[in-house]
Amino acid sequence: MRSVYVHVPFCRKACHYCAFHFSTTRTAQARVLKAMIRELDLRWNPHSGSGPPPLETLYLGGGTPSLLEPDALSFLVRGLGERFDFSTMQEFTLEANPEDVHAKNLELWKGLGVTRISLGVQTVDDRFLQGMNRAHDSRQALDALRLLASDWSGPWTADLIYAYPDQDSEDLVKDLETILSYSPGHFSAYQLTQEPRTVLNTKVQRGDLQMPEDDKALELMQVLYQNAEAQGYRAYEISNFARAGFEAVHNSRYWSGAPYLGLGPSAHSFDGGYTRSWNISHNIHYCRGIEEGSPEQTVEVLSAADCLNEFLMIRLRLDAGMPWSELVSRFGLDAKRRVRERLATLSPTWFDPRGFFGEDDPLRLSNEGRGLADYIASSLFDDVPDPTQDN
Ligand code: SF4
């Protein structure tokens, strides 16, 4: 296993749009961190070979890993460091919220081996930050951006949210101009979505808030792409933008179908083939399962159709697109024929013509197609027989 994700399930406040697993009560923090290390020993024993195995990417996400106190974070990272060889590390990312970014923490994170910071800015619009119950305001966001730009020697990325209620193009341009003026090598921009069982969802259902219409969201997406490109950022994935050489290594592994191990409540793992699993989304039940030696997990064995559909969904989100040759080598000629048949029913304007009409180039979405990526991918979905039988 060369890539590990650790889900730190604690936050200061509950953001109204958030559907991730987290708790704002931290009484179980020490117990959860201990259980994560024990989970690693239970599920995957790195000491079974000769010496600790090499780790290439480590991602501490959540939740809010940056809120961990020095002792707590050191305990977690050292526990991992005793079980893996960190000398092969290509990227060690820590998600940080602006209120945690200060000189002492930067020093701590660097000392623990963190190479990349992912800063949850979201916007510099206080209407949204306050309205959605974020723990920081725009002043803290700007302070954190300034400090990362001046004092953090490694790469860093900023997370943005767009298409929120009442946002217009000028607001988005202001967010982009402000954040990109600090020259992050990378940024991510996710459209606000209304997830079930969130405060945002309740507010919209009650009529207290209105989400932007689809046309408005598409218009904002085009503003995002135009501004990002004008400032030298390439949308190498539909929501991820980088200057050359700053593409995320860990996340790119997810998109290429590489295996990874997820530790902590709600964390997902993938074996790189047909098996996906995820931990229970409950801190105490998670700890209890680990302490009793039987982690509470759900395991899903993917069918060949699931794998093909996931392949289409993920690859069409990438600027590199979906290589026809890879589709054939993984799923067979018959699968390609059926995808081709479905593709012929879709508008050519949604694709780069080279991969749409030919097969030497990958199938890539056009600017227009990127706004319809989920619909396009699901239109190509199909059932296929087991790939070992398909020739
Ligand atoms: S800080 Fe992040 S994980 Fe925590 S509630 Fe807000 S969006 Fe969710």
Image (tube, rainbow, N blue to C red):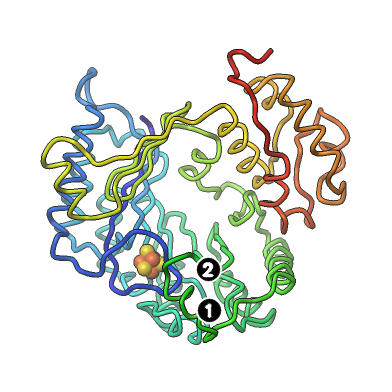
* Residue at 35% from the left image edge and 77% from the top image edge: 135
Q: Is residue 294 left or right of residue 369?
A: left
* On-image quarter of the C terminus: top right
Q: Is residue 92 left or right of residue 288?
A: right
Res. 117 image quadrant = bottom left
In the foreground, 235 or 29 = 29
Q: Could you classify mark 2 by the number of other residues whose Cα lies within 10 Å: few (under 14), some (14-19), or many (20 or more)?
A: some
Disc 1 residue type (three-letter): Val
Tag 2 near tag 1, CB within 8 Å: yes
Asked whether mark 2 lies closer than 8 Å to ligand 1, one says: no
Query: Relative to 193, does residue 7 appear above or below in the rendering?
Result: above
* Residue at 19% from the left image edge and 24% from the top image edge: 47
* Residue at 33% from the left image edge and 61% from the top image edge: 63
* Residue at 11% from the left image edge and 42% from the top image edge: 291
Q: Is residue 271 left or right of residue 336?
A: left
Q: Mark 1 sits on what residue?
A: 204
Query: Relative to 351, does residue 29 appear above or below in the rendering?
Result: below
Q: Mark 2 sits on what residue?
A: 194
- Precedes in sequence: disc 2 or disc 1: 2
Res. 329 image quadrant = top right
Numbered mark located on residue 270 in the image: none
Asked whether mark 1 lies closer than 8 Å to ligand 1, one says: no
Q: Position of residue 303 (x, y in %)?
A: 53, 28
Q: Could you classify mark 1 by the number of other residues whose Cα lies within 10 Å: few (under 14), some (14-19), or many (20 or more)?
A: some
Disc 2 residue type (three-letter): Gln
Cα separation between marks 2 and 1: 8 Å
